[in-house]
Image: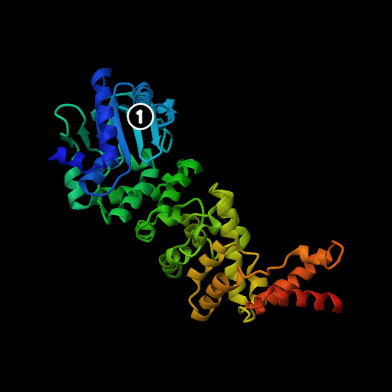
Amino acid sequence: MATDLLAGLSAPAQQLLAEVQALAATSGVVAYLVGGTVRDLLLHSATIDLDVVIVGAAIPFARALQQQVGGDTIAELRVHESFGTATLHFATGLGLDLITARHEQYPAPGALPLVTAGTLADDLQRRDFTINAMAVALQPPTGALLDPLGGRADLHAGVLRILHANSFLDDPTRILRGLRYAGRLAFHLAPDTAARCRAALAAGALATVSIQRFTHEFVRMLAEEQMVAIFDHAETYDLLTHLPVSLPWSAAVRQAQLRLPAYWAAIGEQESRYVLWEGRFALLTAEQPPALAAATAQTLQLPGSTVRLAEQVARLRALIATHPLPTANSQLGQLLDPFDRAAVSTVMALVTDESTVARLRHYLVRVRDCVPMLTGEALVALGLPPGPMYRQILQALLAYKRDHPAVTVSEEQAFLETWIAAT
C-alpha cells in the first residue's frame, strides 16, 4: 500500500527520492519520508516539498546529495547548523528538507528547543500532531508506512491530536498551526487537544513566543487559501483575543475577506510588490485609525509594503465613509490617485454600497491609467521655460484627458495652448 504512496509523488519528486535512496545506501545512514509529505500523500493532495529524516548526519548528507545531483547550479543549499537540518531548493520549484533525526527538550515555555541527535521514534514524537508524525521507509522494506502514534486513524477521522499534554505550552505556535490545519483540511481538534488549546491561550502561552516566531506562523495563516475557515476556527477557540495586537473578526470583515480574492485578481502584475495575504491583513486593520493600522503592522514586524497598505486601506475606508465619491473622472482621480491600486481593490471588498463599488471599479478600469499622450516635452516645444508652472499645467491636462478620454493628441495640444494663453 505504502509503495503506492510514493507512486503518488510527481516524477521529479520520485527521481529525487531515488537519488536520496542511492546515496543513503552508500553513506551508512537511514532515510525516511516524514511529516506533512506523508500526510498529503495519504490525503491524495499535491505536494511540492519533501521532508526526509536522516538517522545519521543530515548536513553532510545534504552536501553530498547536492553534488550528486549536479552541484549548486542545479540545487541551492541552505544549512541550519543549530538544528542539524538542510534544505535543497531546485529551479523546478521542488524543495527537499533534510532533517537529522533528533530529540527535543524545551528549557522554558515558548523557547526554542534544545536539540540532540536521536532515533526516528524520537523525531516523530517531537512533532506537533499525530497526522504529521508518520514516516515512509526509503530503504528496504521500501515504502513501509510507520505510524506509531495513530496518525493515519486520526487523518481518516479528520482529527488533530497533540502528542503530549504540554505540547501547546512548550511551543505555542502549534496553536496557530493547528487552527491552520483545521481550516485547510476541514478537520477538528480532538476534545482533549481542544481543551488544552483553550487552557494554553487562557494561561497567556502566546506571550512566551517571540514576535518573529508568532508573525511567521500568523502570516502563514493569512496566506492560506482557506483563510476564512481558519479564522473562523481562531474565533471559535478565542485565539484572536490573545494576539499581541488587536485584530477584530467581525461579520463585515469576514464577508470582505471572502470577496477580496476576486477584487485582487484585477491588480495583476501592476503592483507585484503586494501579495494577497497583505490585503487580508489590511482588512483586519481597516477599521482602525490609519496611524494605528500602520503601528499594528509594525508591532508584528511585517514588511514595509504591508505597513503602507494597512495605513492606506484604513485611510481610504475612512475617507469614503465620510465623503461621497465624485462623479467627474478628474475629481475621482484626484481623490484616489494617491492610493495604491491594491488599497483601492481592498477597500472595494469592504464596501457594501453597490454604487460606491461601481465607482471604485470605474476608477481602476477607466480612470487610473487614463493619461495624456503629451508630456512635459510639449511644454518645452511651446517655448515655456521649465518651472513650477509645469506641474500645474500637466495636472490641468490630466484632468481634461480624464473628463474627455477620447480626445486626440491634436486636441490635447489645443487645450494646452488655450490654457497657457489664458493663464
In which quarter of the view is residue 165 placed?
top left
The answer to whether residue 53 shows anywhere in this view is yes
Whole-percent x, y for residue 27 in the image = 28, 18
Whole-percent x, y for residue 201 in the image = 39, 49
Q: Nearer the viewer, residue 106 or 317?
A: 317
- For the image, the number of numbered tags is 1
Of all residues, the one furthest to the left in this rendering is 1
Q: Nearer the viewer, residue 65 or 201?
A: 65
Circle 1 Cα neighbour tier, 10 Å, few/some/many (<14 / 14–19 / ≥20): few
Look at the numbered disc 1 and give the secondary structure of its residue.
Answer: strand
Name the residue: 63% across, 78% down: 406
Q: Nearer the viewer, residue 216 or 203?
A: 216
**Quadrant occupied by the C terminus:** bottom right
**Quadrant occupied by the N terminus:** top left
In which quarter of the view is residue 91 placed?
top left
Q: Which residue is mark 1?
A: 105
Q: Is residue 367 above or below residue 185?
A: below
Q: Is residue 422 left or right of residue 331?
A: right
Q: Is residue 76 left or right of residue 166?
A: right
Whole-percent x, y for residue 16 in the image = 29, 33
Name the residue: 19% across, 41% down: 7
Q: Is residue 181 above or below residue 58?
A: below
Q: Is residue 173 left or right of residue 189?
A: right
**Amino acid type for the residue under numbered disc 1:** Gln
Name the residue: 32% across, 50% down: 181
Q: Is residue 328 left or right of residue 158?
A: right
Whole-percent x, y for residue 178 in the image = 33, 48
Q: Is residue 420 above or below residue 270?
A: below
The answer to whether residue 164 shows anywhere in this view is no
